[in-house]
Amino acid sequence: MTQTIAPRVRTLVLLLLAAACALLAGAGPASAHAAVTGSDPGQGAVVDKAPARITLTFSEQVALSDDSLRVLDPEGKRVDTAEPATVSGTTYAVPLHSGLPDGTYTVAYQVVSADSHPVAGAYTFSIGAPSKTSVSVSGQSTDDGVVGWLYGFGRYMSYAGFIVMAGGAAFVLACWRRGSGVRPVQRFVVTGWVALTASTLALLLLRGSFTGSGKVSDIFDLSLLGQVLQTKSGAALVSRLLLLAAAALFIAVLFGAYDKREDAEEKRDLTFGLSIGGVVVAAGLAASWAMSEHASVGLQAGIAMPVDVLHLLAVAAWLGGLGALLVALYRAPADTPVDAPAVRRFSQVAFGSVLALIATGTYQSWRQLGSWPAFTDTRYGQLLLAKIALVVVLVGVAWISRRWTGRLAETVPAEASAVREKERVGAGADGAGETTVVGDTSAKGEGDTGLATDEQPGTESPGPESTGTQSVDSERAAQLARQRAARDAAQRKRKRDADPNRFGLRRSVLAEAGVAVVLLAVTTALTQTEPGRTEQEAKAATAASASSSADEGASGALTLNMPFDTGGEDGKGIVTIDIDPAGVGGNEMHVYVERPNGRAFDIPEVKVEFTLKAKDIGPLPVVPDHIATGHWSANGVQIPMAGDWQVDVTVRTSDIDEVTVSKNAQIG
C-alpha cells in the first residue's frame, strides 16, 4: 500500500504546487501601493502657456531617483531641467525649460513607495492645443516583465521557506520531540532554511532592476546592489540573512545535540532554551517583512507592525506545522511513527493559531480596506475575500482531521500493547534462532563436533579453515538478522498504514496541505496589491480633480461619460467625450477610455459619430488620433447647426469584441 500511495502523494503535491504557481503568475503585475492623487497640470489638461514645473502628489511618501520624474516633448526629448525634489509632504516637482512650444507633453514617473513596491505610470497634458506625440506610455511598469515575475516568485519562495522552517521546527519542539531524530522531518526543516536563504539572496540581486529599468542585464549590476543596500528594503533583506545564520545554529542544535541528549532534566532545559531562542529568531525574521512592507506605512504603523509579526508567526505555526505533520505521517520510519498525542497537540497549536489569525486578520482588513464596499470594488478586497474563503475551507478540513485524530487516539493503546507483545515474543524467538544458526557447526549430532574430518577433538586452537568458517557464519547470521529486522519493520509499516483511521488522517492532512499551498499564493498576491483604502482614496482624488476641471470648463465645454461592456475579456470600461466649445463650427474633441477602477488603458479602435435626427443630418463620422494611453484627440470637428445631437461612440476591445454606446447632448 505504501508503494502505491507515495507516488500519488508526490503527484498530488506537484499538481498543487503547479496550481499555486499558476495562480501566482496569473495574478497579474503588482499594483502600485502609492497612487497619484493629484497633478499640476492635470491629466489631459490644456494650458495657455508653458508651466515652470510639473508637480505630482502621491497617497504616501515615495523614494525618488534622478530619473523618477521625466517630462517629454512630442518628439520624445526630455524638457525637465533638474532632479525631482520634494515640495512638501507627499508632493514632488521637477522644473521645466522656459518657452516650451505648443503641443502635447508626456509626464512619466517611476518611484518606489514607502512599502517597498515600485510605482510607475504616465499621463499627458497640452500647451496651447493638443498635438500628435511619438512618445509611447504603454509598458511603463517594470514589474510585468521577466524581472517582475522572478521577483514575485522569489517573494513566494521566501514566505514558503519561512513557514516551512519556522513551522516545522515549532512542530518538533511543541508537538513531537521524537521528530528531531527523524530524517524526513529534518530534511523538511532544512529545505525551508535553504529556500528562504536562496530567495533572500535572489531578491537582493533582483531588487535594483525590479525598482529601476526592469532589465535582466541589470540583475548583476553591483552599483545597483550598492544602492539597494542603502534602502529600507535592502536593510531588511540583509537583516534577514543575518538572522538566518542564527537560525542555522538553532537547526544544528535541534537536530544534533538535542536529539542525542539522554538525560531528561538536561533535555528539558535545552527544550526551554531552544523554545525561547527559536521564538526570538522567528519573530526577528517576521519583522524583516513587517518593517519594510504594508505594515510599516499608513494608518497606525506602530500597532500594525507587531500585529503583522504575530500574524506571520501564526501562519507559520499552522501551515508549517501542517507540512511537518504531513511529512511525518507519510515518511516517518516504522519504528518512529507519529503518535496520536503529537497530532492532538498540533491540533491545539493550530486552533490557537487560527484564533490569532482571526484577530490579527480582522485588524489588518480594517486597516487596509477602510470600508465594506472596498471588499468588492477593489482588487485587494477581492483577493482578501478569496483568502477568507480558503481559510474557511482549511478550517473545515482541519476539523475533519481532528475527528480522525480522536479515532486514532482510541486505537493507539491497544495497538501499542500488541506491538510490544509481538516484539517481546519475536525477540525470544529470534534469540533461539540465532543460537541455532550460530551454533550450527557444533549441533549436527552426537559426537559430531562440526570440524573437518582430519581434525581431532583435542585440538587447542581452530585452524585457518575453522576460523574462516566461523567468520562466514557470523556474517551470515548478522545478514539474516538485518533481513528479519527489515521484514518486521516493513510488516509493521504495512499494518500501520492499513489502519483506516491513520489512512483517513493522512488523506485529510494532505488535503489541508493542498489548500494551504494555494492560500499562500493568494497571500503573496495580497502583499503585492495596492491596499483597498489607498485605491479608493486615489479614486476619490481623481474624481474631485475631474469635477474641478469640469466646473472650470463649464462655460461652453461638454463632457459625456458612457459606460461600455463589449462582453469579451477585459471588455468593461468608461469612455469620456470632451467637446470644446461644443458649439456650431469647429470643435476640439478628446476621447478618454478608462477601466472601471479609473485607470487609463488602450483599446484597438475608437470611432465617434454625430447625428441630428430632427434635421436628418448625419451620421457624421470622426476618427480621432491616438495621443497617449487611453487618450484620443481630433481637431476641427465640424457641427453644422445647433440642436439635440446623438453622439455614438464605437469601442473595440479585441478583434471581435466591440460595442456602440450613445448619448444625446445639446450642442450649439
Image (cartoon, helix red, strand yellow):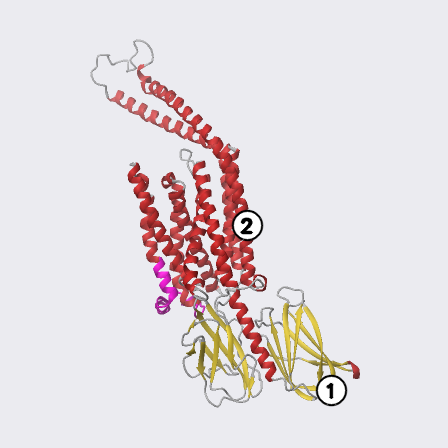
Q: Horizontally, is 453 left or right of 33 in the view?
A: left
Provide the secondary structure element on which disc 2 rests.
helix
In the rendered view, tell whether residue 611 sits above or below residue 216: below
Q: Residue furthest left?
A: 460
Residue visible at 40% across and 77% down?
A: 66
Q: Relative to residue 124, is residue 405 depicted above or below? A: above
Query: How far across and how far down the image is residue 590, in percent?
Result: 62, 80
Is 572 above or below relative to 441? below
Depth check, front residue: 361 or 226: 361
Q: Position of residue 610 (x, y in %)?
A: 72, 80
Q: Nearer the viewer, residue 583 or 471?
A: 583
Residue 642 circle label: 1
Q: Amino acid at mark 1?
A: Ala
Task: Judge by depth and name the residue closer to the eye, 38 or 444.
Answer: 38
Q: Amino acid at mark 2?
A: Val
Percent position of residue 352, x then y: 45, 47
Measure how far apart labels 2 and 1 are at the Cα level.
61 Å
The stretch drawn in magenta includes residue 214:
yes
| Main secondary structure found in the magenta portion | helix
- Residue under the image location 48 percent in, 77 percent down: 56
Which disc, if any, is residue 392? Answer: 2
Mark 1 crowd level (few <14, some 14–19, many ≥20, 10 Å Cα): some
Residue 220 seen in render: no
Magenta span of residues? 211-240
